[in-house]
Amino acid sequence: MSETPSTRAALEHRVRAAIRVIAEEPAVARSGIVPAPGPRRRPRLLAPVAVAVAVVAAVVLVPVLRDGDGAAGPAAADAAPVLPPEFGAMSLLTASLSEAPLGRPGIAVLRQRVIGSFFGLAQAVVVGSDGRTYRRIDLAEERGATEADGEWSPAEALLSPDGRRVAIGDRRGGATEIPVLDLVTGHRRDYPLPAPTAYDLQAWSPDGRRLALALEDTAERVADRFQGTDGYPLALLDLDTGTLTTVPDVVFDPLDSVRFSTEGRLGVPTVQDRGSSAPTTWLTVVEPTGAVTAPMRIPEDSIFGGWTPAGDPLLFSGTGEAVGVQVVRLADGTDVQPSVPIPGERAWLLGWRSPTVLLARIEDLGVVSVDLSSGSVDVLSTFDTGLLTHSTGTSFAERLVTVAAVEPVSPARGPWPAWAITALAVLALAVAALAVRRVARLRATDTARA
């Protein structure tokens, strides 16, 4: 077909239109040229990554938390006992004896609580002879009771002189046995009671073969039964045979100090003419043979604190800012050692470092060393009290605390309790679930916009 002017004009028009289309197309990105940023799309892998992290946390962290915080392993037979300069404050993450046995003797039992406490917020905690291993005595917590001030408190946990065993009390009534735990092996031995009873632990004999306790014959399991003023019978439990013997005609107040001497004599403060206008307090002595005497009257402003290594009674006297430590003769109550003042409103004898140097727990102060010959008082260890919490020592292993070295150590509380690990796992899964839900919403929004 021959070309005419009209066909040539049409072809030129088409070429010009094609060139305009090409010229108006967006620039093609080439090497070295950065494209202009556009809308950023949300990553689609966030949900599976969050779930994977939660699963890994559950798999990896749970065994780590169950292994604990680096507490020391079983103690060597000749390991020297350690007293920390400050006992650790209350922690809800302390492992219990039933979950993780102490594996060593205990040097101290602490009572720790939140002010205004109820069950679960008051603890009985044993500290190992290394000064750093802490365990909750869950059996003592299970057998606790409401005290006269209305606050719940764990049962007594009384350490043996060598720290290897701890006896558990029960002040509620209805108890059918006295449990004793071996802190080294974790073994428990129950000593049957002849009838359902409330009992209050008082003292171990120096050889660890007898326990002194107060009794209240009651089968009803209620609050603390030892809140009366009429006194309670004294009994002795033979830990070799399991025999429980009530000492005739000895009635005493469990709040007073009942202590064995190194010779096995048991000193018990008793009240004569109870209920009269002029009652008097005497030191009743139960001999190892079972004979009972009351040779010495205790002055009105004094309390019986224990015995010296020589077998003389020790009295704590006075009230207010200072307590006097006085040693007297059993025969007539005259002075062997004049009163030595120590700071604090009340003191409890822990043991003796030498014939003239004693250890005592001072209320609101801690463990102190008192040199009766010079009158010097040195604070060895205190109790850490946190915000709205209170901590104090209630029982010490006499043979360990009197020879312990004071060394700075950090608390090792063992594996996390099961409830804490469960809470952490639930929290991790909840975070993963929220992440999945968030990503699902974003995807739905993107789809709607498209």
Image (tube, grey):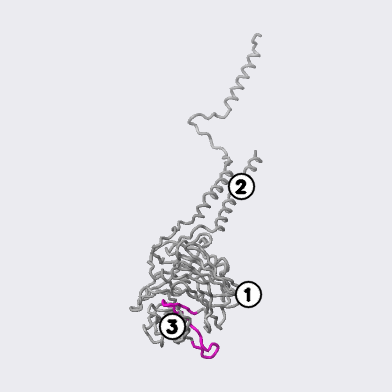
Secondary element at image label 1: loop
**Disc 2 versus disc 1: distance between alpha carbons?**
56 Å
Mark 2 or mark 1: whose residue is earlier in sequence: 1
Q: Which residue, given by chain and number where applicable, does mark 2 sit on? A: 438
What residue occupies the far bottom of the structure in this picture? 277
Q: Which of 353 and 290 is in front in this view?
A: 290
Q: In which quadrant is the N terminus drawn?
A: top right
Q: Looking at the picture, which amino acid does disc 3 mark?
A: Gly
Tag in front: 2 or 1: 1
Relative horizontal placement of residue 51, taking residue 402 as reference (left or right): right
Counting from the top left corner in percent of width and height, residue 266 is at: 46, 79
Q: Which residue, given by chain and number where applicable, does mark 3 sit on? A: 318
Quarter of the image holding residue 41?
top right
Q: In which quadrant is the C terminus drawn?
A: top right
Q: Looking at the picture, which amino acid does disc 1 mark?
A: Glu
**Disc 2 versus disc 3: distance between alpha carbons?**
69 Å
